Amino acid sequence: MTNRRRFLYGMGAMAGTGALAALGACATPGDRRQGHVVVVGGGFAGATLARHLRLWSSGAVAVTLVERNPTFLSCPLSNRVIGGQIALGALTLDYQRLYRAWGIGIRFDDVAGIDTDRRRIILAGGDALAYDRLALAPGIDFLPSEIPGLAGQELTFPHAWKAGPQTALLRDQIADLPDGGVVALHIPRAPYRCPPGPYERACLIADFLKRHKSRAKLLVLDANPEIQSKRDFFQHHFATLYGGVMEYRPNSELRQVDAASRTLHLDFDNVQADVANVIPPHRAGRVVDLIGAPLINKRWVEVDWPSLAVRGFEHIHCLGDAVFPAPGMPKSAHLANQQGKLLAATLLQALGDPKVLPTRVLVNTCYSFVDARRAGHIATVYRFDEGRRTFLPVPGAGGISAIASEEEGRLATAWAHNIWTDTLG
Ligand SMILES: Cc1cc2nc3c(=O)[nH]c(=O)nc-3n(C[C@H](O)[C@H](O)[C@H](O)COP(=O)(O)OP(=O)(O)OC[C@H]3O[C@@H](n4cnc5c(N)ncnc54)[C@H](O)[C@@H]3O)c2cc1C
């Protein structure tokens, strides 16, 4: 990527060069420069944080967002692409409004180093950005090497667990499946991102097979002992809609794969598939290793709630899927967005702009489609517990749909459009 590309949106305001020019990248006329926050990762967590820092400070805080991808691709609704219901283009959004409407400096780059003593990050392209506060929102990275044979075999065993080319690949492989063929979907041990996501995917693949390849079969191979979210809801729809086409097998830990024969070696079984969707185990995005962040279970970043400060690092915060969650908190876009707002308010207070008080209540809502039109939801409310210094679910404050409906299908689509707007402006 050329320098010109990397400065795509920051260019206009980047008069002057050098490390401190990064501040200029975020400046708007009348900017009071109350501080400079660098956010790494422009997903649901990082983009929400960047936008709300600007919105709630009325432009007083300078913000630079570092994102390695030139466009935003939404995982929510991406299972519908795999089910042949919508196109990937419908989930592809751009970052322009973050710059044009909100004055956020965007650097399309990766991070090569973080100097915590001098408070600056070094981009892969060589530039350095000084920060008052750094927020790491890198989402997840995969650990394919934990399953012998899997590393480097993404074309044979697509995960499609980050929306993009993998999503299109899995969709195409399923579309090309011979009638009478076998699709295997392997779910890793929890915690993984989006607990209901694999079961929604199972429904939408089964829906596609039922309509287009009626002799084909879907095997859902779950490393967990049972369905991890909306259990009764999914059990009901697996049985009533897809009894003939889908088989659900719990306790199916994946021990090894063989790419040549597309075989999955499980704890108690071997499965040879025509299409094998293997979701590898995952961990916090690797950029967190650059500060030597303490990882819980060697995977997730330990933070203090509610400040989301990385344990042991006063000026560095982490949010979204990369974080070791509070009890019962799933890794979801909705909570990544909520954490973005929580941290925006927290940072504004720390930078001397206490207009917005950090909320002590977080909400999660997650819809799942079971076919082309019908969906159901799960909703949970979390409140900060002073004694335990963490967020806890509020008993009785949430709910789960018993059965999917077309009305909830419409709400699910509306939810996605709302959260994209709330995240990207
Ligand atoms: C199939 C599927 C369906 C889902 N459906 C839902 C749903 O319906 N509802 C819901 O709430 N959640 C859903 N989720 C979960 C949701 O997508 C994630 O929880 C959410 O994306 C987490 O947000 P994040 O910002 O932490 O990570 P991400 O959205 O993954 O964003 C991280 C960003 O950081 C960037 N990045 C990483 N490292 C670097 C680096 N070193 N330098 C520069 N940039 C970097 C990445 O390019 C990426 O843009 C679904 C997930 C999947 C896989």
Image: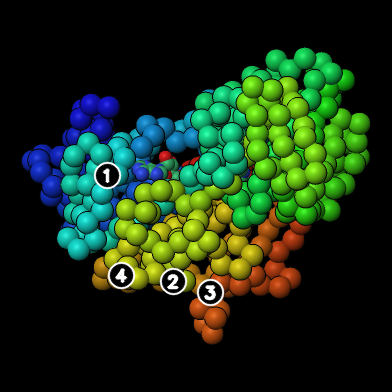
Which numbered disc flags the more N-terminal residue, 2 or 3? 2
From where the camera sits, is residue 371 visible? no
Which numbered disc flags the more N-terminal residue, 4 or 2? 2
Q: Position of residue 71 (x, y in %)?
A: 41, 32
Q: CA distance from mark 4 to mark 2?
A: 10 Å
Which numbered disc flags the more N-terminal residue, 2 or 1? 1
**Residue hosting label 2:** 304
Front of the two marks 1 and 4: 1
Q: Residues within 10 Å of mark 2 (few under 14, many from 20)?
A: some
Which numbered disc flags the more N-terminal residue, 4 or 3? 4
- Secondary element type, mark 3: strand
| Left or right of residue 270: residue 194 | left
Which numbered disc flags the more N-terminal residue, 3 or 1? 1
What amino acid is found at the position of numbered circle 1 in the picture?
Ala
| Left or right of residue 271: residue 36 | left
Q: CA distance from mark 2 to mark 3?
A: 8 Å
The picture quadrant where one finds residue 163 is: top right
Q: Are marks 2 and 1 in contact (CB under 8 Å)?
A: no
Q: CA distance from mark 2 to mark 1?
A: 26 Å
**Residue hosting label 1:** 112
